[in-house]
Image (spheres, grey):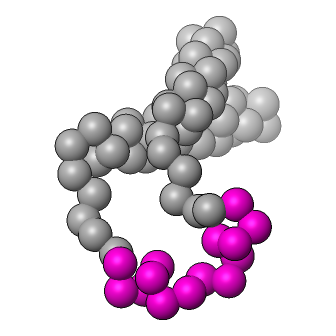
C-alpha cells in the first residue's frame, strides 16, 4: 500500500508540473501586479483547451493531496 501511494504521489506531481507549465499565463509580468480594470471587466469564461487543462490540474492536485495525506496517515 505504501509503495502504491508513493507511486501515485510521484506520478501525480510530475503530471501536475507538466499540466501547469502547459497552461497559458494570466499575468503580464510585473505589470500584472497592479490588477487594473481590464482584469476586472475583461474577464471571460474559460473554454476549450484551457478548461480541460484547468480541470485536469484540479483533479491531479486532489490526487496528489489525498495520496500524501494517506501516506502520512500510514506513517502514524
State the image coordinates of residue 3 (x, y, percent, origin top left).
65, 9
What is the chief secondary structure element of the magenta stretch? Answer: helix
Where residue 38 sits, quadrant-wise, is: bottom left
Residue for point 22% across, 51% down: 47
As for residue 33 lying within the magenta part, the answer is: yes
Residue at the extreme bottom of the image, as rendered: 37
Residue for point 68% across, 30% down: 71
Range of magenta residues: 29-42
State the image coordinates of residue 33 (x, y, percent, origin top left).
70, 76
Residue at the extreme left of the image, as rendered: 48
60 relative position to 54: left or right: right
Q: Is residue 5 visible?
A: no
Where residue 21 sits, quadrant-wise, is: top right
User: In the image, is residue 12 above or below residue 2?
Assistant: below
Residue for point 65% across, 71% down: 32
Residue for point 75% across, 67% down: 30
As for residue 30 lying within the magenta part, the answer is: yes
State the image coordinates of residue 39 (x, y, percent, origin top left).
46, 79
23 relative position to 48: left or right: right
37 relative position to 73: left or right: left
Number of numbered discs visible in the structure rendering: 0
User: In the image, is residue 2 above or below residue 57?
Assistant: above
Quarter of the image with the C terminus is top right
Q: Is residue 15 visible?
A: yes
30 relative position to 23: left or right: right
Q: Which of 43/53 is in front?
A: 43
Amino acid at each position: 500500500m505504501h509503495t502504491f501511494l508513493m507511486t501515485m504521489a510521484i506520478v501525480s506531481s510530475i503530471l501536475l508540473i507538466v499540466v501547469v507549465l502547459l497552461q497559458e499565463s494570466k499575468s503580464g509580468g510585473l505589470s500584472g501586479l497592479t490588477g487594473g480594470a481590464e482584469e476586472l471587466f475583461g474577464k471571460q469564461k474559460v473554454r476549450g483547451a484551457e478548461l480541460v487543462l484547468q480541470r485536469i490540474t484540479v483533479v491531479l492536485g486532489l490526487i496528489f493531496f489525498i495520496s500524501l495525506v494517506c501516506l502520512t496517515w500510514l506513517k502514524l
